[in-house]
Image: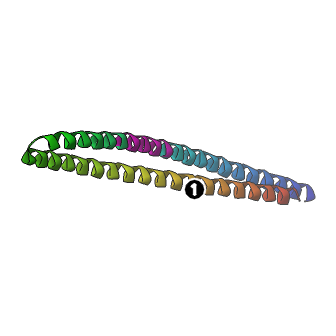
Amino acid sequence: AQHDAAAARDATAAAVQDAAAAVLAAADAQQERVVAAAKDEQAHAAKAEEDAEIDAAVVQSLRDQLHVAQHDAAAARDATAAAVQDAAAAVLAAADAQQERVVAAAKDEQAHAAKAEEDAEIDAAVVQSLRDQLHVAQHDAAA
């Protein structure tokens, strides 16, 4: 009976270890997927930020063009100057609105990346907890 009990205890310990190893493998795979998603989100955020910087340069160029247009318009008739200024202001307003949309999109992408990174950290904590539980189960099985 002692021999049978020892064999049963060993089989139970092996089954617990196998189950715990399977759970850890699944948790590791999930963590890798979450980390990959976080990196992808960060790449999207970086691209959106780069696009926002390009748009800012375009807006600055438009501002410079507006300055030149205003100078030229001052030399022309008042009606022509007013028309050029109105058109330039409309272009700048559209460019500013576009830049605001791109900046908002970049911030949104960064928020998604930060959330994905936070999820990856939580998953890492879960994996560590599972590792600790496995260690305790192994210790209990050995006892």
Residue drawn at x 45%, y 46% as measured from the top left = 45
In the image, is 121 to the left or to the right of 60? right
Residue 113 horizontal/vertical position (percent): 50, 50
The correct choice, above or below, for 46 with respect to 117 in the image is: above
Of the 4 image quadrants, the one containing the N terminus is bottom right
Residue 9 horizontal/vertical position (percent): 83, 57
Residue ID for mark 1: 118
Q: Is residue 52 magenta?
A: yes
Closer to us: 40 or 24:
40
The correct choice, above or below, for 72 with respect to 105 in the image is: above
Closer to us: 141 or 98:
98
Q: Is residue 82 magenta?
A: no
Of the 4 image quadrants, the one containing the C terminus is bottom right
Residue 50 horizontal/vertical position (percent): 43, 40
Say how many tags the image has.
1
Label 1 secondary element: helix
Residue drawn at x 53%, y 54% as measured from the top left = 114
Q: Callout 1 environment at 10 Å: few (<14), some (14 to 19), or many (20+)?
A: some
- Identified by mark 1, the residue type is Glu
In the image, is 112 to the left or to the right of 142? left
Please report the bounds of the magenta region as a residue range: 42-55
Residue drawn at x 52%, y 56% as measured from the top left = 115
Residue drawn at x 81%, y 55% as measured from the top left = 138
In the image, is 109 to the left or to the right of 35? left
What is the image's colouring? Answer: rainbow
